[in-house]
Amino acid sequence: GKGAEGRGRAARIQRRLLLVNVERQIMQYHIGLEQGM
């Protein structure tokens, strides 16, 4: 019921934050490559 629904929402939010974090790291990595060249 209610508890499982809340857990699912939290997991979905965590996954979204994780994806945003990964994208930011990839962008910083590419920026670092461009500045290095």
Image: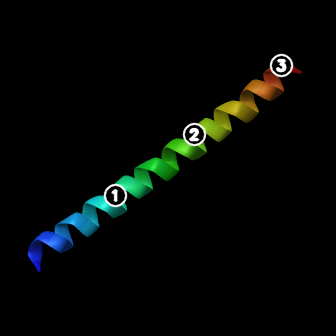
Q: Which residue is mark 2?
A: 24
Which residue is found at the position 35% from the left and 63% from the top? 12
- SS at mark 3 in the image: helix
| Disc on res. 31 | none
Q: Amino acid at mark 3?
A: Gly
Residue that label 3 marks? 36
**Disc 1 residue type?**
Ile
Q: Residue at x 26, y 59 (%)?
A: 10
Q: Say what amino acid the circle numbered 2 marks.
A: Arg
Q: 29 left or right of 8?
A: right
**Contact, mark 2 vs mark 1 (Cβ under 8 Å):** no
Mark 2 neighbour density, 10 Å: few (under 14) some (14–19) many (20 or more): few
2 or 1: tag closer to the N-terminus: 1
**Separation of residues labelled 2 and 1 (CA atoms):** 17 Å
Q: CA distance from mark 3 to mark 2?
A: 18 Å
User: Could you say whether the residue bearing mark 1 is in a helix, strand or loop?
Assistant: helix
- Relative to residue 33, is residue 13 depicted above or below? below
In percent of width and height, residue 19 lies at 51, 52
| Left or right for 15, reference 5 | right
Residue underneath mark 1: 13
